[in-house]
Amino acid sequence: MAGTLYGMTREQLRELGIPGDDHDSADSAHTFPDGGNFRIEVPTVNSVEAADRLLTESKRRGLTINRITETFGMFRHTADEIRQYVELGREYGAQILMSVGPRAVYDIGGGVQTPEGARIGYRLRGQEQLVRAVEDVRRGIALGVRGFVVYDEGLLWVLGRLRTAGHLPADVHLKTSAHCGHGNAATARLLETLGANSFNPVRDLTLPMIGAIRSAISIPIDIHVDNPRLSGGFVRTYDAPEFVRVAAPVYLKTGNSALEGHGTKPTMAQVDQILTQVDIVSEFLHTHYAQARQSPAGAF
């Protein structure tokens, strides 16, 4: 019934390249440049020790982790720690994404601490924090980082423009975080035009919603297969093959259901639980969507 209502608006949105939530989402015909349909991303890898164990043990188990994401805040790591992240990425062929450090939860502004503060997300408060966020990215670049998690749409616009102007390296990768709170095709397209290289929607979207986003953008979609209790605690392992089918190319984000929240540093026992979840997701993809191809290590 819903699909028959508001016909003029639906048609005008289609003319803009924004489809509806189609319950018969077609298989995606898109891939990564190497021909891969999906890549495995492990988020919340918030210490060098955790990154080292994760990548070393995944290689021993025959698992490919294409990307790891640090979410503690780049400005809370020493220069030597950041260099070690970069070196581990080179050694194991994993893309390293570091999160821009200054953000609302670390600021002195009290709004984010209120019951309604979740609406602020991790966005920047005031122009000086914007300046510092750009400086945080410049610090990372100087230490060898080429991938960044961005939490503020204005910062994304600034970094995209600076990259286009040649003030930042052309190979800098800008990933928008799920903490921005976006979950529709129009917003995904907007972020792509602002310079996003991959788009991470909110974690609770249905397959048709994800299929609509894929129809509207060309950049990869970062999709949570599971996530910590504090962000919902969803474990959608059986959806993983469908995510790939509908939305390729995708980064399947998995493993941090072993953690309580995103700002934590995993213990070594939790890293082992993360690896178990990566193993399970890899098994389900092989079993239920065997024709889907994972990008090899070193493909960025």
Image: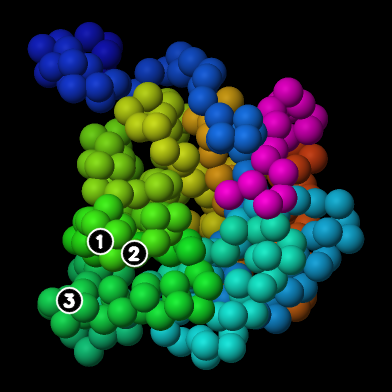
Residue 10 to residue 216: above or below:
above
Q: Is residue 100 visible?
A: yes
Q: In terms of sequence position, does the residue under pointer 3 or pointer 1 come before the other?
A: 3
Q: Which residue is mark 1?
A: 162
- Residue extending furthest toward the right: 60
| Residue at 72%, 44% in the rendered image | 296
Q: Kindly report the distance in space between the C-alpha atoms of the residues bearing marks 3 and 1.
A: 20 Å
* Residue type of the residue flagged with mark 3: Arg
Specify the principal SS of the magenta part: loop
Label 2 crowd bin: few (<14), some (14–19), many (20+), radius 10 Å: some
* Residue type of the residue flagged with mark 1: Leu
**Left or right: 210 as drawn, with respect to 183:** right
The secondary structure type at the circle numbered 1 is helix
Q: Which mark is residue 122?
A: none
| Residue at 42%, 84% in the rendered image | 75
Question: Which of 80/210 is in front?
Answer: 80
**Left or right: 156 as drawn, with respect to 13:** right
Q: In terms of sequence position, does the residue under pointer 2 or pointer 1 come before the other?
A: 1
Residue 207 to residue 126: above or below:
above
- Residue extending furthest toward the front: 166
* Residue type of the residue flagged with mark 2: Leu
Q: Which residue is mark 3?
A: 125
Write down the region rendered in magenta.
285-300
Q: Decide: marks 2, 1 in contact (CB < 8 A)?
A: yes
Membership of 275 in magenta stretch: no
Location of residue 39 in the rendering, given as x and y in whole percent from the top left corner: 63, 44
Location of residue 179 in the rendering, given as x and y in whole percent from the top left corner: 36, 60
For the N terminus, give its image quadrant: top left
Q: Which residue is mark 2?
A: 168
